C-alpha cells in the first residue's frame, strides 16, 4: 500500500464503536495493529458515494503543488517582508507602490502555473456528482483561480482573487463585473513592467499616478481580503448556506490557522457531519476529523475520489470547455 499517513475515526474502523474519535495510523498500522490501506480508502469512498451535498474547502497546500508560494514557514518571505507585512491596509496607505509590486509578482507567478492533479480531481468529482443529481461546492482560501482553470465550477472565493481589482473606497470583495471585476492585463499597468522581483532590494517607488487606475481615473487595489479586513458578508452568507446543506466536508491543504475558515471543520464535526482532511501534516483540527489522509493532494485525491487519470482529465476538460 502507499506509504501514506492515515487517521480514521473509530466509527469507521469498528462497527461496535459509536464514539467519535480519531485513530492515528502511520503507513499501514493503527496503534501497532496492522490495517489494510485499501480498506481504509474504501470506507471513505463508500461515504462519498452516499453524500449528496459535498463541500470541499481548500487552502494553500493544493496550490503549492502547482508551484505557488505559500509565504509561510522557512523561506516564506518576499524580499524582507512576510506576507502579513505587505497585505494589510496600513501597508497600502503607507506604500501602495510596494503593495502593487508584491501583487504584480504574485500575478506573474500564477500566470505561469498550471492546475495540478488535485485541482483536476476536484473538478472531476463535481462532474461525477452532477450526473447523479448531487452537488459539490468548493470553498477556497486561495486567490489564484487554479480551481477554475482546472475545470471546477461553483467555487466560493473566501479571500477574493489576484485577478480581481476594485476601487480603493469600495467595500466588499464579491465580483460583480462593475465595482469588483477581473483584469488579467500583463502587466496591469505599464509602470509595473519588470517590477516585483523577490530577490532584489526595494528600489525607487512608483508614483501613485502611475499605479493601476480605472477608466474614471480612480486608484485601484487588488480585490483580495487583507490581514485586518473582514470577509465580504455576501460571501459568508453563501458559505453559511452551503455548510448548512453539507453532508460531507472535505478539507484539503489548509494550515487551519486562518479564521474563520479554520473553524469550519470543528463546526461540521460538532454537527455530526463527517469530516475528511487531506494535508501534508497534521493540523489543529486533525483530531476532530473522521478521516485524515496525509500526503499530496495530487496523489491522494484521484484515489479518494475513485478517479483514474484519464477520467479526471476528461471531466476537468469538459467542465472547463
Image (cartoon, rainbow, N blue to C red):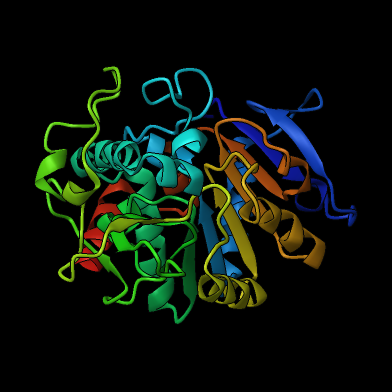
Q: Position of residue 98 (x, y in %)?
A: 33, 36
Q: Residue at x 62, y 55 (%)?
A: 261
User: Which of the 4 image quarters holds residue 239?
Assistant: bottom right
Relative height, residue 159 to residue 28 (above, below): below
Q: Position of residue 223 (x, y in %)?
A: 37, 59
Relative height, residue 318 to residue 313 (above, below): below
Numbered marks: total = 0
Q: Position of residue 256 (x, y in %)?
A: 64, 43
Q: Position of residue 295 (x, y in %)?
A: 52, 32
User: Which of the 4 image quarters holds residue 242?
Assistant: bottom right
Point out the image quarter for the C terminus. bottom left
Relative height, residue 133 to residue 314 (above, below): below
Q: Residue at x 73, y 39 (%)?
A: 284
Whether residue 156 is visible here, answered yes or no, is yes
Q: Residue at x 58, y 55 (%)?
A: 250
Q: Is residue 267 left or right of residue 77?
A: right
Q: Is residue 155 left or right of residue 321?
A: right
Name the foreground residue: 15 vs 144.
Answer: 144
Name the foreground residue: 230 vs 9.
Answer: 230
Name the foreground residue: 229 vs 282.
Answer: 229
Q: Residue at x 53, y 23 (%)?
A: 73
Relative height, residue 56 to residue 23 (above, below): below
Q: Is residue 140 left or right of residue 119?
A: right
Point out the image quarter for the N terminus. top right
Whether residue 300 is visible here, answered yes or no, is no
Amino acid at each position: 500500500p502507499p506509504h501514506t499517513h492515515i487517521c480514521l475515526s473509530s466509527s469507521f474502523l469498528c462497527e461496535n464503536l459509536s464514539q467519535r474519535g480519531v485513530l492515528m495510523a502511520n503507513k499501514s498500522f493503527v496503534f501497532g495493529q496492522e490495517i489494510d490501506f485499501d480498506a481504509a480508502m474504501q470506507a471513505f469512498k463508500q461515504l462519498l458515494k452516499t453524500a449528496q451535498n459535498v463541500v470541499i474547502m481548500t487552502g494553500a497546500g493544493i496550490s503549492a503543488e502547482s508551484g505557488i508560494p505559500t509565504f509561510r514557514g522557512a523561506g516564506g518571505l518576499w524580499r524582507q517582508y512576510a506576507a502579513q507585512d505587505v497585505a494589510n491596509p496600513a501597508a497600502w496607505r503607507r506604500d501602495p507602490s510596494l503593495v502593487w509590486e508584491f501583487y504584480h509578482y504574485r500575478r506573474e507567478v500564477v500566470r505561469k502555473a498550471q492546475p495540478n492533479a488535485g485541482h483536476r480531481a476536484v473538478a472531476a468529482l463535481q462532474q461525477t456528482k452532477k450526473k447523479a443529481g448531487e452537488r459539490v461546492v468548493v470553498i477556497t482560501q486561495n486567490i489564484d483561480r487554479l480551481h477554475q482553470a482546472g475545470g471546477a465550477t461553483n467555487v466560493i472565493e473566501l479571500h477574493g482573487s489576484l485577478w480581481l481589482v476594485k476601487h480603493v473606497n469600495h467595500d466588499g470583495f464579491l465580483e460583480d463585473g462593475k465595482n469588483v471585476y477581473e483584469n488579467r492585463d500583463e502587466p496591469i499597468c505599464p509602470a509595473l513592467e519588470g517590477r516585483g522581483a523577490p530577490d532584489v532590494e526595494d528600489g525607487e517607488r512608483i508614483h501613485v499616478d502611475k499605479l493601476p487606475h480605472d477608466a474614471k481615473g480612480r486608484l485601484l487595489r487588488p480585490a483580495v481580503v487583507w490581514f485586518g479586513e473582514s470577509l465580504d458578508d455576501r460571501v459568508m452568507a453563501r458559505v453559511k448556506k452551503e455548510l448548512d446543506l453539507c453532508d460531507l466536508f472535505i478539507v484539503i491543504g489548509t494550515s487551519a490557522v486562518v479564521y474563520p475558515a479554520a473553524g469550519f471543520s470543528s463546526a461540521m464535526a460538532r454537527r455530526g457531519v463527517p469530516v475528511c482532511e487531506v494535508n501534508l501534516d497534521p493540523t489543529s483540527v486533525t483530531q476532530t476529523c473522521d478521516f485524515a489522509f496525509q500526503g499530496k493532494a495530487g496523489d491522494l485525491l484521484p484515489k479518494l475520489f475513485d478517479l483514474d487519470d484519464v477520467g479526471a482529465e476528461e471531466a476537468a476538460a469538459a467542465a472547463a470547455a
